[in-house]
Every structure is written in structure tokens, then in C-alpha cells.
Amino acid sequence: VRKLWGVGPVSEKKLQKENILTIGDLADLSEKDAKALLGSAVGRQLQGLARGFDNRPVCERAIAKQISSESTYRTDITDKAGII
């Protein structure tokens, strides 16, 4: 559950005490129970995120974070022996 955006160490410990260990466990929790456990605003938001609801806008990054290049073989390799 810690991999979910917004779940920090404090929320994680609260959830673990209730045996909520995965994002799926949090998604299965009712909104009412999530609010009671984590607070009204945070509980509703995290439970929604666990169910795949996210109203935040998607923005592309302004600066490239990675540059890569590829090399290919002249002929297709079809077995492991050809790679070595």
C-alpha cells in the first residue's frame, strides 16, 4: 500500500494495524471505513486512488530525464546460443 501516492509512513502504519497491506486491500475498504481510519479528506482521496479514480491533470515533463540508443544485429537471432 505504501507505493500508492500519498501513503506515507504514518498512514502505512495505521493501515497495517488494520491488516490493509496492499492497494487492493485499501480499494476493498468502504469509503466510510477509510475516512474513519485516515481522516475524512485523506481517507476519501486514498481510497479513490486505490480504486483508480484520480482527477489530477496529466502533464508531460518539461525536460527529458533519459536519453537512450539502440543497436540491432544484422540478422535476427532466434536462440540463446546466438546471443553469447
Image (cartoon, grey):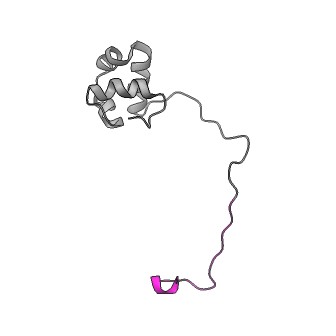
Magenta part mainly helix, strand or loop? loop
The residue that appears at 66% across and 69% down in the rendered structure is 70
Q: Is residue 59 above or below residue 15?
A: below
Q: Is residue 22 left or right of residue 6?
A: left
Residue 82 image position (x, y, % from top left): 51, 86
Look at the image and say whether residue 37 sits in the magenta stretch: no
Q: Is residue 54 above or below residue 67?
A: above
Q: How many marks?
A: 0
Q: Is residue 2 left or right of residue 21?
A: right
Q: Nearer the viewer, residue 81 or 73?
A: 81
The residue that appears at 35% across and 16% down in the rendered structure is 35
Q: Where on the picture, by quarter, is residue 19?
A: top left
Look at the image and say whether residue 69 sits in the magenta stretch: yes
Residue 69 image position (x, y, % from top left): 69, 65
Residue 16 image position (x, y, % from top left): 31, 29
Q: Nearer the viewer, residue 57 or 61?
A: 61
**Which segment did they paint magenta?**
68-84
Is residue 54 at all visible to an observer of this figure?
yes
Is residue 79 at all visible to an observer of this figure?
no
Question: Which residue in the rendered view is the most extreme toward the left?
Answer: 19
Residue 55 image position (x, y, % from top left): 52, 27
Q: Where on the picture, by quarter, is residue 11?
A: top left
